[in-house]
Amino acid sequence: MAAAPASAPAEPMHLPSRELRCHLGHATNLDATREQSRDEIQYDAWHDLALALPSIPARTTPPPDATDPAEPVDPGTRVLADPDHLTKDAVGSFNRVIDLWPDRVELTMPMAGGVSKLLIVSDFDAQANTVQLFMTDAQDLATFDFNRTFLGDCKVLMTAAATNGS
């Protein structure tokens, strides 16, 4: 009896291309000693920021540890609009992206002095097509500059992902 021909491995699913149009508040009363609800946080100014997250293959392995070398970043991952210059102190483009859409996306941009601009996208609401964005200057994923922290909502515009090489 002849063996059945091996089928080609399936191409990985692709995440959709996403544009995030965000309205971020500069948080003024963050307290690292306790958990705060969003209703407790006060803001002194509001800013717009737009980001592009390109269609990429969905992750099939666990994300790298924060101490592991960064994986290559798709150059389509970029700031589209920053009229109030919230990211002006970054030196270059995104250098680390962990895209676990729709659960979470972590992005960093290098800054001078070993600090990074850290952005965390979370809380995707599929019905409203919105996410939450947290942005701060950070030494690492746990050490934030609470004087440079912004939080807010983003409208998500998605383009269907290409599948199976199409």
Image (cartoon, grey):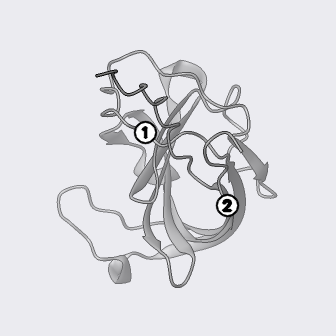
* Element carrying mark 1: loop
Q: Is 97 positioned to the left or the right of 94 in the image?
A: left
Q: Amino acid at mark 2?
A: Ala
Which of the pair 21/60 is nearer the observer?
60
Q: How many marks?
A: 2
Task: In the rendered structure, find residue 112 and report the number of the disc placed on it.
Answer: none
Residue 109 position within the rendered picture, expressed as x and y whole percent measured from the top left: 59, 33
Which residue appears farthest toward the top when viewing the image? 69
Residue labelled with disc 1: 59
Residue at image coords 69%, 53%: 51
Q: Residues within 10 Å of mark 2 (few under 14, many from 20)?
A: few
- Quadrant in which the C terminus appears: top right
On screen, residue 69 versus residue 74, left or right, reads: left
* Relative image position of residue 146 (x, y in whole percent): 41, 52
User: Which of 27/160 is in front?
Assistant: 160
Expressed as whole percent of the image width and height from the top left, the position of residue 111 reads: 60, 27
Residue at left offset 69%, top offset 31%? 93
At a point 45% along the width and 66% down the height, the residue shown is: 28
Q: Residues within 10 Å of mark 1 (few under 14, many from 20)?
A: some
> Who's the residue at 44% across and 76% down the image?
42
Image quarter for residue 155?
bottom right
Report helix, strand or loop for mark 2: loop
Real-space CA distance between mark 2 and mark 1, rounded to the nearest whole angstrom: 17 Å
Q: In which quadrant will I find the N terminus? A: top left
Q: Is residue 149 left or right of residue 111?
A: left
Front position in the image: 121 or 138? 121
The quadrant where residue 68 appears:
top left
Amino acid at circle 1 = Arg
Which residue has dot 2 on it? 160
- Rendered position, 2 above or below 51: above
The location of residue 106, given as percent across then percent down, is: 46, 44
Asked if marks 2 and 1 touch (Cβ < 8 Å), the reply is no
